[in-house]
Amino acid sequence: MDELIACAVKAREYAYAPYSKFKVGAAVQTKSGRIFSGCNIEDSSYGLSNCAERTAIFKAVSEGEQQLTTIAVVADTTEPVSPCGACRQVMAEFGIEQIILTNLSGKRKILTLEEILPFRFANGDIVKDGEKNND
């Protein structure tokens, strides 16, 4: 857990946040033990920005890792930082069961996917040809 948090803290240093000045780092661990880190990347057209959590997850997936187990997220906040809804849904897509929220002071909250997004959208919710897909 400490290594994962350290990777998230390091990733935060690379954040590109010229508009909000709110730098976030994340690191995700795969079932095979690999760690992928990411930072938030802003754009002057805010909708084109990407959060640290999704950057880390997308890096893992783009390297062939889809079995993700744990993610750590860090920011310079009073309390442990909380992921946005889009990031929570992406965590759900890849079944990340342990979510470690922290800050630079070392405060931590460890949550499950069910706790952070209890009514998530899932593959079984997708309708194909008028029938529910339960794959």
Image (cartoon, rainbow, N blue to C red):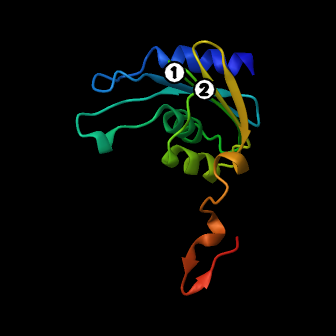
Quarter of the C terminus within the rendering: bottom right
Cβ atoms under marks 2 and 1 closer than 8 Å:
yes
Measured along the vertical axis of the image, is residue 45 above or below residue 89?
A: above
Name the spot of residue 94 as percent of width and height, x first: 65, 49
Residue type indicated by callout 2: Pro
Which residue is at the front of the view, 97 or 33?
97
Name the spot of residue 59 as percent of width and height, x first: 53, 35
User: Which numbered dot is residue 77?
Assistant: 1
**Residue at image coords 58%, 24%:** 79
Disc 2 to disc 1, C-alpha distance: 7 Å
**Residue at image coords 56%, 78%:** 127
**Residue at image coords 27%, 26%:** 19
Quarter of the N terminus within the rendering: top right
Crowding at label 2, few (<14), some or many (≥20) Cα neighbours within 10 Å?
Answer: many
Which residue is at the front of the view, 69 or 98?
98
Measured along the vertical axis of the image, is residue 7 above or below residue 59?
A: above
Q: Secondary structure at mark 2?
A: loop
Measured along the vertical axis of the image, is residue 99 above or below residue 130?
A: above
Name the spot of residue 110 as percent of width and height, x first: 73, 32
Residue type indicated by callout 1: Thr
Picture quadrant of residue 105: top right
User: Which numbered dot is residue 28?
Assistant: none
Per the image, the residue denoted by label 2 is 80
Q: Is residue 94 left or right of residue 38?
A: right
Measured along the vertical axis of the image, is residue 124 above or below residue 117?
A: below
